[in-house]
Image (tube, rainbow, N blue to C red):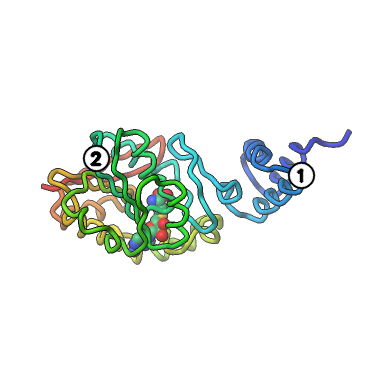
Amino acid sequence: MSESPEETVVRRLRAAGCVFAEDEARLLLAEAGSAPELDALVARRVAGEPLEHVLGWAEFGGLRIAVAAGVFVPRRRTEVLVDEAVALSRPGAVVVDLCCGSGALGVAVATAVDRVELYAADVDPAAVRCARRNVAGAVYEGDLYDPLPAQLRDRVDVLVANAPYVPTDAIALMPPEARHHEARAALDGGADGLDLQRRVAAGAPGWLAPGGALLIETSVRQAPGTLAAFAAAGLRARVVQDEDLAGTVVVGRLR
Ligand SMILES: C[S@@+](CC[C@H](N)C(=O)[O-])C[C@H]1O[C@@H](n2cnc3c(N)ncnc32)[C@H](O)[C@@H]1O
Protein backbone atom coordinates (compact mmCIF):
# COMPACT_ATOMS: atom_id res chain seq x y z
CA MET A 1 0.00 0.00 0.00
CA SER A 2 1.43 3.43 -0.92
CA GLU A 3 1.88 5.98 1.84
CA SER A 4 -0.46 8.96 2.28
CA PRO A 5 0.78 12.53 1.55
CA GLU A 6 0.98 13.09 5.31
CA GLU A 7 3.09 9.96 5.83
CA THR A 8 5.43 11.06 3.02
CA VAL A 9 5.91 14.48 4.63
CA VAL A 10 6.50 12.96 8.07
CA ARG A 11 9.07 10.56 6.61
CA ARG A 12 10.95 13.37 4.81
CA LEU A 13 10.92 15.61 7.89
CA ARG A 14 12.08 12.77 10.17
CA ALA A 15 14.93 11.92 7.82
CA ALA A 16 15.99 15.60 8.00
CA GLY A 17 16.08 15.40 11.82
CA CYS A 18 12.85 17.29 12.63
CA VAL A 19 11.93 16.25 16.17
CA PHE A 20 8.25 17.20 15.89
CA ALA A 21 7.77 15.76 12.41
CA GLU A 22 4.07 14.86 12.88
CA ASP A 23 3.11 18.32 14.17
CA GLU A 24 5.10 20.07 11.46
CA ALA A 25 3.64 17.84 8.74
CA ARG A 26 0.13 18.75 9.87
CA LEU A 27 0.93 22.48 9.71
CA LEU A 28 2.65 22.25 6.32
CA LEU A 29 -0.24 20.24 4.85
CA ALA A 30 -2.72 22.83 6.10
CA GLU A 31 -0.66 25.66 4.59
CA ALA A 32 -0.07 24.17 1.13
CA GLY A 33 -2.69 24.81 -1.54
CA SER A 34 -1.51 22.03 -3.86
CA ALA A 35 0.81 19.01 -4.03
CA PRO A 36 3.64 20.97 -5.77
CA GLU A 37 3.33 23.74 -3.17
CA LEU A 38 3.51 21.17 -0.36
CA ASP A 39 6.60 19.67 -1.96
CA ALA A 40 8.25 23.10 -2.14
CA LEU A 41 7.41 23.91 1.51
CA VAL A 42 8.74 20.57 2.72
CA ALA A 43 11.92 21.02 0.67
CA ARG A 44 12.56 24.39 2.34
CA ARG A 45 12.03 22.90 5.79
CA VAL A 46 14.23 19.90 5.01
CA ALA A 47 16.94 22.33 3.87
CA GLY A 48 16.91 23.85 7.37
CA GLU A 49 14.68 26.93 7.16
CA PRO A 50 12.81 27.62 10.41
CA LEU A 51 9.28 26.19 10.30
CA GLU A 52 7.82 29.66 10.92
CA HIS A 53 9.61 31.14 7.90
CA VAL A 54 8.34 28.30 5.74
CA LEU A 55 4.77 28.72 6.99
CA GLY A 56 4.99 32.52 6.89
CA TRP A 57 3.67 32.85 10.42
CA ALA A 58 4.47 32.06 14.04
CA GLU A 59 2.18 31.44 16.96
CA PHE A 60 2.86 33.91 19.75
CA GLY A 61 0.67 34.51 22.78
CA GLY A 62 -2.17 32.64 21.10
CA LEU A 63 -1.94 34.92 18.04
CA ARG A 64 -0.84 34.21 14.48
CA ILE A 65 1.98 36.62 13.67
CA ALA A 66 3.29 36.99 10.11
CA VAL A 67 7.04 36.38 9.87
CA ALA A 68 9.14 36.83 6.75
CA ALA A 69 12.50 35.39 5.71
CA GLY A 70 15.34 36.84 7.76
CA VAL A 71 13.04 38.31 10.41
CA PHE A 72 13.45 37.11 14.01
CA VAL A 73 10.91 34.42 14.94
CA PRO A 74 9.16 35.45 18.19
CA ARG A 75 9.97 32.98 20.98
CA ARG A 76 7.65 31.48 23.59
CA ARG A 77 9.89 32.80 26.41
CA THR A 78 9.07 36.38 25.37
CA GLU A 79 5.45 35.83 26.44
CA VAL A 80 6.78 36.48 29.98
CA LEU A 81 7.58 40.05 28.95
CA VAL A 82 4.16 40.43 27.34
CA ASP A 83 2.38 39.25 30.52
CA GLU A 84 4.30 41.80 32.60
CA ALA A 85 3.61 44.56 30.07
CA VAL A 86 -0.11 43.73 30.00
CA ALA A 87 -0.24 43.90 33.80
CA LEU A 88 1.27 47.41 33.66
CA SER A 89 -0.89 48.75 30.81
CA ARG A 90 -4.14 50.55 31.56
CA PRO A 91 -6.81 50.89 28.85
CA GLY A 92 -5.71 53.59 26.41
CA ALA A 93 -2.02 53.23 27.36
CA VAL A 94 0.68 54.48 25.00
CA VAL A 95 2.86 51.45 24.25
CA VAL A 96 6.10 51.43 22.26
CA ASP A 97 7.68 48.22 20.95
CA LEU A 98 11.34 49.02 20.27
CA CYS A 99 13.45 46.53 18.26
CA CYS A 100 10.06 45.20 17.22
CA GLY A 101 11.05 42.58 14.61
CA SER A 102 7.72 41.15 13.46
CA GLY A 103 5.94 43.39 15.98
CA ALA A 104 4.76 40.38 17.99
CA LEU A 105 5.21 41.92 21.45
CA GLY A 106 3.32 45.11 20.75
CA VAL A 107 0.53 43.27 18.95
CA ALA A 108 0.13 40.86 21.88
CA VAL A 109 -0.08 43.74 24.39
CA ALA A 110 -2.50 45.70 22.19
CA THR A 111 -4.68 42.61 21.80
CA ALA A 112 -4.88 42.06 25.56
CA VAL A 113 -5.48 45.69 26.63
CA ASP A 114 -8.30 47.94 25.41
CA ARG A 115 -7.58 50.94 23.20
CA VAL A 116 -3.78 50.75 23.37
CA GLU A 117 -2.02 53.42 21.28
CA LEU A 118 0.73 51.27 19.75
CA TYR A 119 3.95 52.40 18.08
CA ALA A 120 6.75 50.11 16.92
CA ALA A 121 10.22 50.60 15.45
CA ASP A 122 13.11 48.54 14.09
CA VAL A 123 16.34 49.28 12.24
CA ASP A 124 15.93 46.43 9.74
CA PRO A 125 13.79 47.29 6.67
CA ALA A 126 12.69 43.61 6.33
CA ALA A 127 11.49 43.62 9.95
CA VAL A 128 9.67 46.93 9.44
CA ARG A 129 7.88 45.58 6.34
CA CYS A 130 6.90 42.47 8.29
CA ALA A 131 5.75 44.42 11.36
CA ARG A 132 3.55 46.62 9.14
CA ARG A 133 1.61 43.46 8.24
CA ASN A 134 0.99 42.72 11.92
CA VAL A 135 0.79 46.06 13.73
CA ALA A 136 -2.33 48.20 13.48
CA GLY A 137 -0.41 51.29 14.68
CA ALA A 138 2.59 53.09 13.17
CA VAL A 139 5.85 51.23 12.50
CA TYR A 140 8.99 53.36 12.10
CA GLU A 141 12.37 52.46 10.60
CA GLY A 142 15.63 53.52 12.20
CA ASP A 143 18.08 53.20 15.08
CA LEU A 144 16.32 52.70 18.45
CA TYR A 145 14.51 55.95 19.41
CA ASP A 146 15.69 58.01 16.40
CA PRO A 147 12.65 57.43 14.17
CA LEU A 148 9.99 57.94 16.89
CA PRO A 149 7.90 61.11 16.57
CA ALA A 150 8.93 63.81 19.04
CA GLN A 151 5.37 64.11 20.33
CA LEU A 152 5.84 60.74 22.06
CA ARG A 153 8.44 62.22 24.41
CA ASP A 154 7.36 61.94 28.08
CA ARG A 155 4.15 60.16 26.94
CA VAL A 156 5.08 56.47 26.79
CA ASP A 157 3.38 54.41 29.49
CA VAL A 158 4.93 51.07 28.62
CA LEU A 159 8.11 50.63 26.59
CA VAL A 160 8.91 47.04 25.63
CA ALA A 161 12.15 45.88 24.00
CA ASN A 162 13.46 42.50 23.09
CA ALA A 163 16.72 43.96 21.85
CA PRO A 164 19.46 41.60 20.62
CA TYR A 165 21.35 40.24 23.64
CA VAL A 166 23.49 37.37 22.41
CA PRO A 167 27.18 38.07 23.13
CA THR A 168 29.01 38.24 19.79
CA ASP A 169 31.20 35.21 20.54
CA ALA A 170 28.15 33.10 21.51
CA ILE A 171 26.45 33.51 18.13
CA ALA A 172 28.57 30.68 16.71
CA LEU A 173 27.06 28.38 19.35
CA MET A 174 23.46 29.11 18.37
CA PRO A 175 21.38 26.57 16.42
CA PRO A 176 21.89 26.83 12.63
CA GLU A 177 18.23 27.84 12.17
CA ALA A 178 18.97 31.08 14.02
CA ARG A 179 22.51 31.62 12.71
CA HIS A 180 21.62 31.10 9.06
CA HIS A 181 18.07 32.38 8.84
CA GLU A 182 17.74 35.28 11.30
CA ALA A 183 19.50 38.57 10.62
CA ARG A 184 22.79 39.02 12.47
CA ALA A 185 21.50 42.38 13.72
CA ALA A 186 18.60 40.54 15.38
CA LEU A 187 20.98 38.49 17.52
CA ASP A 188 24.26 40.34 18.12
CA GLY A 189 24.30 42.28 21.38
CA GLY A 190 28.01 43.11 21.33
CA ALA A 191 30.87 41.76 23.49
CA ASP A 192 28.79 41.05 26.62
CA GLY A 193 25.42 41.06 24.82
CA LEU A 194 24.25 44.20 26.59
CA ASP A 195 25.25 47.00 24.18
CA LEU A 196 21.72 47.55 22.85
CA GLN A 197 20.08 47.10 26.27
CA ARG A 198 22.32 49.83 27.74
CA ARG A 199 21.34 52.20 24.94
CA VAL A 200 17.63 51.37 25.28
CA ALA A 201 17.75 51.92 29.07
CA ALA A 202 19.77 55.14 28.78
CA GLY A 203 17.26 56.61 26.33
CA ALA A 204 14.09 55.51 28.11
CA PRO A 205 13.74 58.40 30.62
CA GLY A 206 13.41 60.84 27.71
CA TRP A 207 10.32 59.01 26.43
CA LEU A 208 8.58 57.51 29.48
CA ALA A 209 5.59 59.24 31.04
CA PRO A 210 5.80 59.85 34.80
CA GLY A 211 5.56 56.38 36.38
CA GLY A 212 6.04 54.76 32.97
CA ALA A 213 7.68 51.35 32.69
CA LEU A 214 10.50 49.88 30.61
CA LEU A 215 10.61 46.11 30.08
CA ILE A 216 13.60 44.38 28.50
CA GLU A 217 14.05 40.66 27.93
CA THR A 218 17.36 39.25 29.11
CA SER A 219 18.83 35.95 30.37
CA VAL A 220 19.35 34.76 33.94
CA ARG A 221 23.11 35.13 33.53
CA GLN A 222 22.88 38.63 32.03
CA ALA A 223 20.13 39.93 34.35
CA PRO A 224 22.58 41.64 36.77
CA GLY A 225 24.09 43.57 33.84
CA THR A 226 20.63 44.50 32.56
CA LEU A 227 19.64 45.67 36.06
CA ALA A 228 22.80 47.79 36.22
CA ALA A 229 21.83 49.43 32.91
CA PHE A 230 18.41 50.32 34.35
CA ALA A 231 19.99 51.72 37.53
CA ALA A 232 22.46 53.80 35.51
CA ALA A 233 19.49 55.30 33.66
CA GLY A 234 17.79 56.19 36.97
CA LEU A 235 15.13 53.46 36.76
CA ARG A 236 14.04 51.42 39.78
CA ALA A 237 14.03 47.84 38.50
CA ARG A 238 13.29 44.22 39.37
CA VAL A 239 13.89 40.89 37.67
CA VAL A 240 11.02 38.59 36.68
CA GLN A 241 11.81 34.96 35.93
CA ASP A 242 9.53 32.24 34.61
CA GLU A 243 11.06 28.79 34.75
CA ASP A 244 8.32 27.11 32.69
CA LEU A 245 8.84 29.44 29.73
CA ALA A 246 12.57 29.95 30.48
CA GLY A 247 11.98 33.69 30.21
CA THR A 248 13.71 36.49 32.10
CA VAL A 249 12.64 40.13 32.02
CA VAL A 250 13.84 43.26 33.77
CA VAL A 251 11.02 45.65 34.59
CA GLY A 252 11.90 49.20 35.58
CA ARG A 253 9.99 52.36 36.36
CA LEU A 254 10.93 55.98 36.38
CA ARG A 255 11.85 56.96 39.93
C1 LIG B 1 15.91 39.63 19.16
S1 LIG B 1 15.08 40.43 17.83
C2 LIG B 1 13.51 40.69 18.60
C3 LIG B 1 12.38 40.97 17.65
C4 LIG B 1 11.01 41.03 18.34
N1 LIG B 1 10.98 42.07 19.35
C5 LIG B 1 10.66 39.69 18.95
O1 LIG B 1 10.86 39.51 20.16
O2 LIG B 1 10.20 38.83 18.21
C6 LIG B 1 15.85 42.02 17.89
C7 LIG B 1 15.38 43.04 16.87
O3 LIG B 1 16.10 44.25 17.12
C8 LIG B 1 16.36 44.90 15.90
N2 LIG B 1 17.47 45.82 16.09
C9 LIG B 1 18.79 45.52 16.22
N3 LIG B 1 19.52 46.65 16.39
C10 LIG B 1 18.62 47.68 16.39
C11 LIG B 1 18.76 49.10 16.50
N4 LIG B 1 19.95 49.68 16.69
N5 LIG B 1 17.64 49.86 16.45
C12 LIG B 1 16.41 49.27 16.25
N6 LIG B 1 16.23 47.95 16.12
C13 LIG B 1 17.32 47.16 16.19
C14 LIG B 1 16.63 43.76 14.94
O4 LIG B 1 16.46 44.17 13.60
C15 LIG B 1 15.62 42.71 15.41
O5 LIG B 1 14.42 42.82 14.69
Asked whether mark 1 and ligand 1 are closer than 8 Å, the reply comes as no
Whether pointer 1 and pointer 2 mark residues with C-beta atoms closer than 8 Å, the reply is no
- Establish if 24 lies above or below 121: above
Residue at screen point 49% across, 63% down: 172
What quarter of the picture does the N terminus occupy?
top right
Q: Determine whether the residue tagged by mark 2 lies in a helix, strand or loop.
A: loop
Q: Residue at x 48, y 43 (%)?
A: 65
Mark 2 surroundings: few (<14), some (14-19) or many (≥20) residues within 10 A: many
Residue annotated with mark 2: 93
Q: How many marks?
A: 2
3D distance between C-alphas at marks 1 and 2 = 47 Å
Can residue 71 be seen? yes
Mark 1 burial class by Cα count in 10 Å: few <14, some 14-19, many 20+: few
Describe residue 20's horizontal placement relative to residue 70 as left or right.
right
Could one spot residue 228 in this view of the protein?
A: no
Q: What amino acid type is highlighted by mark number 2? A: Ala
Disc 1 target residue: 35
Q: Position of residue 200 (x, y in %)?
A: 26, 58
- In-image side of 249 versus 166 (left or right): left
Of the numbered discs 1 and 2, the one sitting upstream in the chain is 1
Q: Position of residue 232 (x, y in %)?
A: 16, 57
Name which residue type carries label 1. Ala
Front-most of residues 143 and 231? 143
Disc 2 Cβ-to-ligand 1 distance below 8 Å: no
Q: Quadrant of residue 33?
A: top right
